[in-house]
Image: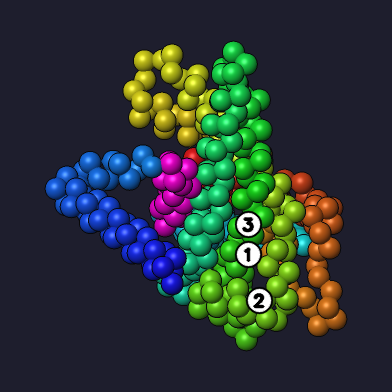
Amino acid sequence: MPQAARALESTKQSSEAVLSDASSAMSKAAENPKKATTDLLHTPFMRGALPFINGGLAGMTATSVIQPVDMVKVRLQLAGEGVKTGPKPTPVTVFKDILAQGKITDLYTGLSAGLLRQAVYTTARLGFFDTFMKSLSVTAESQGHAIGFKERAAAGLAAGGLAAVVGNPADLALIRMQSDGLKPPARRANYTSVVDALRRISRSEGVLRLWAGAYPTVVRAMALNFGQLAFFSEAKNQLRTTDLSAQTQTLAASGVAGFFASFLSLPFDFIKTRLQKQTRAADGSLPYKGMFDCFKKVAAEEGLLRFYRGFGTYYVRIAPHA
């Protein structure tokens, strides 16, 4: 009994100490909110979490702005599937068709999926990239040399690939929601939100179907991050010796990174869109068996240049994220 009493008393004292510390911290925060915020941001946990938080918020903000551009991009990639000749849609004609078939808010179809994708994918890729870069910088400094393009490229490739696997379900839901309007009204799924899309796809096609197109998604992400993060970091490093202001340097580096990211990743983005959009026919077959089969069929039936259709639209979509 005495031992139990001592344990109870010790627990009580510990609880009182925690409450006292919490009360003291709250009092200090009330007296000096700015200092309390600064102290919080400099805790080890927040220093590790901030790259992920900032990345996610940045990606979600960019998506809110460029969602209509992404909608047009997806419709361009799906137009004329399996046909080498015929009408050649442009961003303007696709934009007009979407408005003619519905209303201006249709341009924001799939926004919930786009935001979820950024919350998961961009949070992960920028957080991983920052984490990898810090680790590589420490290693480079210990060896007596500065971090170079090779290290930046490796960090970008690894971060993009890892994040793409995590974000694939939201990416697939986004493509399904954006392509739904191309189907006859009777065959449309009419998803109400990304949660509805994920639930119905997993229920009718299986949970693993949420990772359809994961291979080209990973390759696309690696190519995108290699072009976007590595070239952005390298361009900013090269521009530091110029007389340009810091803001102009950032914008210029973003333009360079956006171009290389678009050029390197668009073919894989095209294949990813085609694979994620497809659904099984009545006999259970799919139009494409995988990434290489899709590449072969599109190249034979539609031509190699089809992979770069809508490059300008894709660049406008990628540049804000850079």
- Residue at the image point whose x is 56% and y is 18% from the top: 141
Task: Let me know if residue 61 is in the magenta part.
Answer: yes
Locate residue 289 relative to residue 91 in the image: left or right: right
Q: Residue at x 81, y 63 (%)?
A: 288
Tell me which amino acid carries mark 2.
Answer: Ile
Inter-mark Cα distance, 3 to 1: 8 Å
User: Which of the numbered marks, if any, corresponds to residue 169?
Assistant: 1
Q: CA distance from mark 1 to mark 2?
A: 10 Å
Residue 135: give x, y in percent of width and height.
Answer: 58, 31
Direction from residue 262 to residue 62 in the image, left or right: left
At x 36%, y 25%, the residue is 246
Read off the residue under disc 2.
Answer: 201
Q: Would residue 62 be seen by someone viewing this image from the given angle?
A: no
Q: As displayed, is residue 60 above or below residue 1? A: above
- Contact, mark 3 vs mark 2 (Cβ under 8 Å): no
Tag 1 and tag 2, C-beta contact below 8 Å: no
The region drawn magenta spans: 44-64
